[in-house]
Amino acid sequence: MDMQLKRYGVFLFFCLAMLAHVQAGIVLPDLLGDNMVLKQKSKVMFWGWDAPGTDIRVKAGWDGKEYAARAGADGRWEVRLSTASAGGPYRIWVKGTDEVVLENVMLGEVWFTSGQSNMGWTVTEERNAENVLKTAKHDRIRLFHVPRCVSDDKETAFGKKASWKMCDAASVKDFSAMSYYFAVALQEELDVPVGIISASWAGTGIESWLSDELQASDAELSKPLARWEGWKESYPADSAKYAASMAAWEARKQAGEQLPPVKKPKSVHMMERPHCKPGSLYNAMVYPCMPYTLSGFVWYQGENSIEWSEEYAFQLQNLIESWRDGFASQAPFLVGQLTNFNYPSAERAAMVRDAQLKAEDMPGVYAICTIDIGNPDDVHPDNKLPFGERFAGMALNKVYGKAFVSAAYPVAHRAKVKKGRIEVGFKRAKGLHAQGEHVNDVVLYDHEGNRLEIEKAYVDKNRLVVEAGSIDGVAKVSYAVDNDVKANLYNGNGLPAFPFSLTVKQ
């Protein structure tokens, strides 16, 4: 026993000595490493840790300029590097207690992409994956896949090791397909290096990506926290009851009975998914990336927020504001609207879409319509190319001033009775037309919410016209708000109109 204790003591001393050595030297976040892309022509944040009080020198390879900082009481230091125009590769030298040299650093554009399963859908899962991977070598595209981790506290480092990768078949096969297509389109048009930092997790609501501290500070935002605590409290009893029910179900099934499956209690379902806890992914996957200097954000999420759709508009607004604050930038924010699918509630899915479009009221926020490129029978369309290209089109037009790239999706803004028919006016609707004889999925409602018969819906002079036998009792008109729609209303640039519901002015 004494010998074992002695060996344990030597081992513990060795570990502590190694830890002290690591802490005494320069530590950089994983995001600041070889192969990274820094935003061009900007003052980019560059930070790390060393022994408290250590003088730090950072030298940039593109201009030879040196920057000075001093590690604080917590060991953290930061500087802002002035970057040149797009180019590279460069080195960056960091000197403190020891020296670190970063290699193959590029200057260009850097985007943060995030969301749930459709954003996380990998290139390997694409229907055309084999052909995509054959042409996936792009030396000037760099990829950073944020490891999937959860935490109850704001973390300064990821729970797993991560690094920047040069884009090729090996590095991109398990990377976000939507983000990859977005990057390729940007890089080809801008002819500059492009870096993508991608953080996603399937089956997550927006509350997982929003700071739990922020949620706790507001009565409206705190509703997911209250739900989580309720599930947590109910879990022990619900779990025991569920286990007993499953045991009985299995016994009866073995006896030859045909039985419906046992429904899993909501508390059990949620407690098995710690990544769904409010704030858990913000703490572990978003906060460690802050305050990396970005060109913009791409957000595609919402499927798991349909159940509480009435909360989504305020949540999305706060996510945008808090992420911009955390990354110390009012960078553009691209929001993908939910696509077509047979959702559990078409009405609630429409509410989420409305909230995503409403986000455009915020400065520098742009919504992308995807209603025509989904799959009503599969929540995961297996071709993310049009999604990535539409995000890229919006970025090229709104962020990079490429006016020749179409990005103006038609938005309905008024509906009124005129000459015995209903006319819907649009913004961004030059060349509005239906791909087909009539406009599909147009519905009229009376004041009680009952659906009314229509005779036809068509386009006339960039307006949607709806004719019905009688329009006296019409209160509302909608387009493409149901499940399994065949949306076919486009402008002259081939961009689809956003789904809408409008009150009809008599």
Image (cartoon, rainbow, N blue to C red):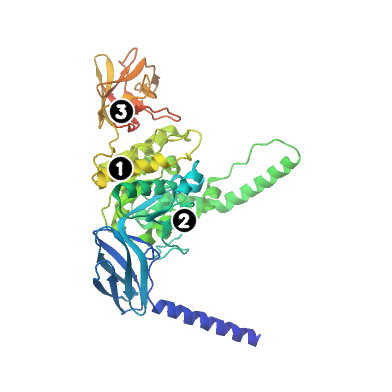
In the image, what residue occupies the spot 39% across and 50% down?
Answer: 114
Amino acid type at image mark 1? Met
Q: Is residue 95 left or right of residue 262?
A: left
In the image, what residue occupies the spot 25% across and 47% down?
Answer: 400
> What residue did someone put label 1 on?
394
Mark 3 secondary-structure assignment: strand
Q: CA distance from mark 2 to mark 3?
A: 46 Å
> What residue did someone put label 2 on?
171
Amino acid type at image mark 3? Leu
Residue 433: x and y, percent? 31, 24
Residue 450: x and y, percent? 40, 22
Mark 2 secondary-structure assignment: helix
In the image, what residue occupies the spot 31% across and 62% down?
Answer: 88
Judged from this view, the residue extending furthest toward the top is 469
> What residue did someone put label 3 on?
502
Mark 2 and mark 3 lie on one chain; the one further toward the N terminus is: 2
Give the position of the N terminus as an image quadrant.
bottom right
| Residue 426 sits above or below residue 308 on the image | above
C-beta proximity under 8 Å, tags 2 and 3: no
Give the position of the C terminus as an image quadrant.
top left
- Give residue 367's quadrant in the image: top left
- How busy is the neighbourhood of tag 2: few (under 14 within 10 Å), some, or many (20 plus)? some
- The answer to whether residue 311 shows anywhere in this view is no
Nearest the viewer among 264 and 437 is 437
Depth check, mark 2 against mark 3: the one in front is 2
Q: Is residue 106 left or right of residue 280?
A: left
Depth check, mark 1 against mark 3: the one in front is 1
- How busy is the neighbourhood of tag 3: few (under 14 within 10 Å), some, or many (20 plus)? some
Amino acid type at image mark 2? Ser
Mark 1 secondary-structure assignment: helix
- The answer to whether residue 242 shows anywhere in this view is yes
Nearest the viewer among 478 and 98 is 98
